Image (cartoon, rainbow, N blue to C red):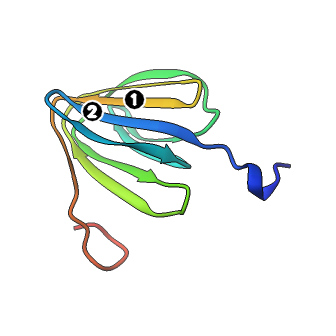
Amino acid sequence: MMAESSKALMQVNIVAADHPVWHGTAKSVTIPASEGEMGILADHEPVLTVIKGGTVSVVDPAGERHAFEVSDGFISFDFNKLTVAVERGRDVVRTEGPGIE
């Protein structure tokens, strides 16, 4: 069992064709994969997959959730580095409350 202080993290880089959208460290990321939602945690097996338009959700080390609207693209994950490459992407403006409108 892992000690609380040694939680695995991953580096995340979300990029659109014409600008970087977000980069940082995360505990988990949920992506709109072509086959349905897919969750990725640190130490996940390597993956390269197509994603569809939707919301990428990132949980940072402090437990805060960040959401990004993205268009079709792909993700690549290996050695705790996740790259989300999309044609268009933007930060979602968050409202108070549990859901993102």
Left or right of residue 98: residue 68: left
Residue 32, image x, y percentages:
33, 40
Left or right of residue 57: residue 60: right
Residue 81, image x, y percentages:
51, 29
Q: Are marks 2 and 1 in contact (CB under 8 Å)?
A: yes
Amino acid of disc 1: Thr
The answer to whether residue 98 is above or below residue 8 is: below
Left or right of residue 88: residue 54: right
Q: Real-space Cα distance between discs 2 and 1?
A: 8 Å
Amino acid of disc 2: Val
Left or right of residue 67: residue 60: right
Identify the residue shown where x is 27% and y is 50%.
Answer: 68
Quickly name the residue at label 1: 83
Residue closest to the eye, 24 or 40: 24
Residue 64, image x, y percentages:
46, 63
Which quadrant holds residue 18?
A: top left
The answer to whether residue 64 is above or below residue 50 is: below
Disc assigned to residue 15: 2
Q: How many marks?
A: 2
